[in-house]
Amino acid sequence: MIVRIMGEGQAKLDDAHFTELNKLDDELLAEMEGGDEAGFRRTLSTLLDAVRRLGTPLPDDALEPSDLILPSPEATLEEVRELLGDDGLIPG
């Protein structure tokens, strides 16, 4: 799976990591629904760090289609709300 972090680039992740990322996405969604800004910041940072840690960065000139697009670390709660689908940022 190819994941893009807005403003940073893309990383290739093994599908085996989907469960970990989806758990963090569920936490993020719950914090957003509850208006927990501090929790939102913490979980967004953890989610993006997991992508960076588990993924292999693609070269900047790679033109791979992204399977997932995640917000930048500076994204606000309102900006992330606009990106959300029914399942959160990560479908499934």
Image (cartoon, rainbow, N blue to C red):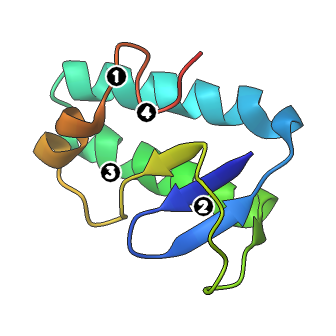
CA gap between label 3 and label 2 equals 12 Å
CA gap between label 1 and label 4 equals 6 Å
Type of the residue with mark 3: Arg
Tag shown at residue 47:
none
- Which of the marked residues, 1 or 3, is nearer the chain's N terminus? 3
Q: Residue at x 47, y 49 (%)?
A: 69
* Residue on which disc 2 sits: 49
Tell me if residue 70 comes above or below residue 11 in the rendering.
Answer: above
CA gap between label 1 and label 2 equals 22 Å
Mark 4–mark 3 CB contact (< 8 Å): no
- Which of the marked residues, 4 or 3, is nearer the chain's N terminus? 3
Give 40 or 67, whichever is nearer the viewer. Answer: 67
Type of the residue with mark 1: Gly
Type of the residue with mark 4: Leu
- Rendered location of residue 48, percent (x, y): 54, 57
CA gap between label 1 and label 3 equals 19 Å
* Disc 3 crowd, CA 10 A, few/some/many (<14, 14-19, 20+): some
- Which of the marked residues, 3 or 2, is nearer the chain's N terminus? 3
Q: Is residue 88 left or right of residue 82?
A: right
SS for dot 1: loop
* Residue on which disc 4 sits: 89
Mark 1–mark 4 CB contact (< 8 Å): yes
CA gap between label 4 and label 3 equals 15 Å
* Disc 2 crowd, CA 10 A, few/some/many (<14, 14-19, 20+): few
